[in-house]
Image (tube, rainbow, N blue to C red):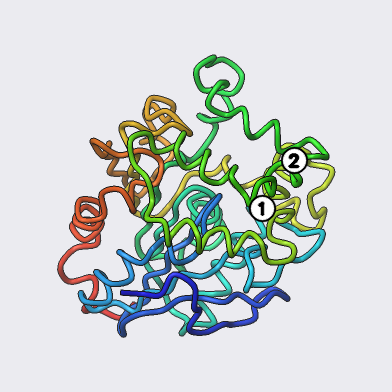
């Protein structure tokens, strides 16, 4: 099984070095992690889909060492999209299937808006596309309660709080977001090791700060940023959400179909929370494999 810690390669895209964990050979399947997480979170997908004929690559997203941690970003979704597109080009060009969880889902959506020709099929987990979450933050008291951390992260002391007591915050947030499930001790130890690396704690918070403080975004990305969330996704998409997600309630997404002009399959995964790809890997992998189709891994795009 893939190591919790050791990257197997790296590429430079958009001025940042992105380290990655890789398994298998064949058409590219890119797996993008979220917060608070890192590339080895996709170890079950790396193992399974490498066995099904894919070259599976899970990068450490920008700001998550050993990838570059630019001190001032950018960490907005338009920058994440550029990384996704750059990774596809650097890892062989053509097209790739893309799986994104949490912030990785937002980066995947953004790439699908800006370069739909680069993505053959899109799989996203735990965060819906479009205005649904923003609307829930305004008018859904239960989601406001779940999303307390987003506003907490805007405080100047948030980085110190995140690191307090050897990053105990990480254990708390995983327990809240995936109630009734706990990661393996070595998995949490490896995650904390990532967050101890210089620049990671600040960068992970800057994802949120640049979202809620547009003045901190790169003005050179403004035109691209305006398209993301406003334009429909023109790539066939599978959206998966855990029924017990304590981060974003499964009801928040609503009917997403009008936002996906190439088709959307929306599945609620039972007995799973926010980290559904780790909690129920067999079911999640089966849903992804079925969506990609039996011939997808045999055809280089």
Q: What residue is disc 1 on?
A: 204
Residue at the far left in the pictured view? 294
Q: What residue is disc 2 on?
A: 158
Residue at the far front in the pictured view? 165
Of the two numbered discs 1 and 2 on the same chain, state the one appearing first in sequence: 2
* Viewport quadrant of the N terminus: bottom left
**Residue lying at 31% horizontally and 32% vertically, measured from the top left:** 243
Determine whether 234 is above or below 136 in the image: below
Percent x, y for residue 194? 59, 64
Callout 1: SS: helix
Percent x, y for residue 152? 70, 32
**Residue lying at 74% horizontally and 66% vertically, measured from the top left:** 198
- Report the number of discs: 2
**How far is disc 1 from disc 2 in space, using C-alphas?**
11 Å
Residue 195 in which image quadrant: bottom right
Percent x, y for residue 47? 28, 72
Determine whether 106 is above or below 144 in the image: below
């Amino acid at each position: 099984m893939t190591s919790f810690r050791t990257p197997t390669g790296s590429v430079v895209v958009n001025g940042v070095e992105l380290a990655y964990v890789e398994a298998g050979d064949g058409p590219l399947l890119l797996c993008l992690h979220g917060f608070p997480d890192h590339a080895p979170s996709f170890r079950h997908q790396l193992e399974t889909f490498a066995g099904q004929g894919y070259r599976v690559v899970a990068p450490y997203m920008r700001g998550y060492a050993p990838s570059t941690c630019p001190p001032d970003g950018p960490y907005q979704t338009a920058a994440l999209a550029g990384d996704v597109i750059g990774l596809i080009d650097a890892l062989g060009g053509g097209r790739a299937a893309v799986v994104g969880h949490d912030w990785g889902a937002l980066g995947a959506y953004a790439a699908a808006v800006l370069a739909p020709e680069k993505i053959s099929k899109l799989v996203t987990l735990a965060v819906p596309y479009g205005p649904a979450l923003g609307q829930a933050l305004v008018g859904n008291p239960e989601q406001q309660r779940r999303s307390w951390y987003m506003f907490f992260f805007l405080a100047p002391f948030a980085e110190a709080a995140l690191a307090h007591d050897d990053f105990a915050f990480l254990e708390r947030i995983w327990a809240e977001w995936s109630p009734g499930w706990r990661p393996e001790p070595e998995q949490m130890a490896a995650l904390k090791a990532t967050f101890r690396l210089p620049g990671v704690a600040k960068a992970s918070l800057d994802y949120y700060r640049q979202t809620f403080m547009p003045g901190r975004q790169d003005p050179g990305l403004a035109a691209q940023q305006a398209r993301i969330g406003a334009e429909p996704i023109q790539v066939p998409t599978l959206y998966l959400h855990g029924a017990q997600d304590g981060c974003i309630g499964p009801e928040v997404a609503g009917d997403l179909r009008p936002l996906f002009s190439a088709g959307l399959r929306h599945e609620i995964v039972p007995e799973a929370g926010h980290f559904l790809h780790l909690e129920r890997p067999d079911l999640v992998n089966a849903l992804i494999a079925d969506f990609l189709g039996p011939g997808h891994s045999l055809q280089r795009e």
